[in-house]
Amino acid sequence: MSIERFHIAHSIDEALDLLAKEGSGAQILAGGTDLLVALRAGALDAGKTAFIDISRIPELSRLTLNGPDGQCQLGPCVTHHRIAEDAGLGRASIILGQASHSVGSPQIRRRGTIGGNILTAAQCADTIPVLLALDAQLLLRDTKGTDRTMAIKDFFPAPKKTAIKADELLLGISFASLAGKPWKGSYYKLIRRAAVAKSRLNFAVLIKTDLQGKVDEARISIGSTLPTPGRFTPAEELLKGNKPSIELAQAAADACSAYMIQVAGRRWSAEYKEPVVRNLARRGILKVFGLEQAPEESLEQHPEAQHGA
C-alpha cells in the first residue's frame, strides 16, 4: 500500500467528484491526527492510494447555533479546539465542549476534527458518547448527489465499523439545542495520565427534569464498554419519573453495570470494568442531581490511573 496522489478539494462538489474518480482507493483527510500516524506506521487500510483533503471546504467548517427547528449544526471539519472554546455551543450541548477539551493535547485539538472522531469509530472516542446523549443526526451525501440522514445510534453496525458507504461524504452533524431548557449534564473521562491520553472509559449523561423536579428524560452513554457505541436504556428508564436522590443514582449506576455485562458478556476485562462503570455512573448522575459526595474510594483499584472530567 502506498499513497500515490494527494488532492485538495475546495468545494463539496469537487470532493465528491474526486471521490467518484478515485473510487475505493480514496481516503478522506481532514485533521489527519489519526490517519497520518497510521500512514507512518504502515497501518492505513489496504488499497488506499489517494488522499482527498477536505479541510479547505468552507461549508464543512461551519458551526451554526439555533438553526432550522432549533437545531445546532456542525461541519465535520470543526475542530475540537473550536468546540471547546465556543460558549454558545457549550450552552446548546452542555457537555460536548468538555468532551472535546479532553481530547489529546492542545496541538491535537487544534487539528483534530469532530468528523474524524466519529469516523474512526474508536471505542475510546471522546465525543461519541456525548453525541449519542444528544441524539445527534449525521448528514451524508454520495457521489450522485443523494443525501441521507442517519441517527448516530445507528451509525456503528459492528466494532470499529461505520455505516458510511465508500462513495459517501459526511457533510454535517446536527442535534436539538438544549439551551434555555431544563437539561443538565456531566461528562467524565477515566485516563492513565493528565494529558495526551486515550480514555479508558468515558461517561456522558444528560437529564431533563419536569416542573415537579422529577426526571422527565435521561440519556446515558459510556464509551469503551459495549461492542458498539450505544445508550444505556435500562438505566435511563429507571431514572424517569423519579425524584433525584442518592439511592436513585446508585440504582441507575447498578443498572449501567448490569447492562454492560448483559450486552458485552463477562469477558476478561469485566472484573475491572464492572465496578468502575458503576462508580463512574454514580458520580456522573450525582453531579447532575447536585448531590455530589466526597469520593469514598477510587474509581478503580489501579493506582496509576487517573480520572478526568
Image: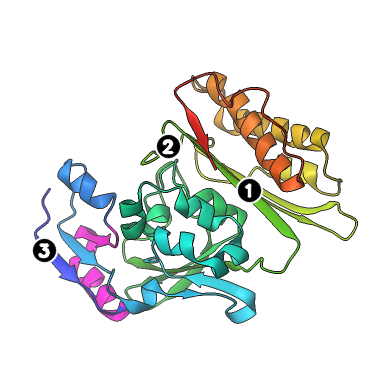
From this view, report whether residue 177 is shown above or below residue 116.
below
- Is label 1 or label 3 in front? 1
Does residue 153 show up?
no
Q: CA distance from mark 2 to mark 3?
A: 38 Å
Tag 2 and tag 3, C-beta contact below 8 Å? no
Q: Label 1: how many residues lie within 10 Å, few (<14), some (14-19) or many (20+)?
A: many
Give the quarter of the image for residue 75: bottom left
Q: Give how far across and how far down residue 241 sits, in percent.
A: 86, 49
- Is label 2 or label 3 in front? 2
Q: Earlier in the sequence, mark 2 or mark 3?
A: 3
Label 3 sits on residue: 5
Q: Earlier in the sequence, mark 1 or mark 3?
A: 3
Residue at image position (86%, 46%) is 243
**In screen coordinates, is 64 left or right of 176?**
left
- Is label 2 or label 1 in front? 2
Label 1 sits on residue: 186
The majority secondary structure of the magenta stretch comes to helix
- Read off the magenta span: 12-31
Q: CA distance from mark 2 to mark 1?
A: 19 Å
What type is the residue that disc 2 sits on? Ala
Q: CA distance from mark 1 to mark 3?
A: 43 Å
Task: Name the element at disc 2.
Answer: loop
- For the C terminus, the image quarter is top right
Q: Label 3: how many residues lie within 10 Å, few (<14), some (14-19) or many (20+)?
A: few
Q: Give how far across and how far down residue 81 sits, in percent.
A: 40, 60
What type is the residue that disc 1 sits on? Ser
Residue at image position (37%, 73%) is 60
15 drawn magenta: yes
Any mark on residue 194, and which? 2
Does residue 27 show up?
yes
Q: Label 2: how many residues lie within 10 Å, few (<14), some (14-19) or many (20+)?
A: some
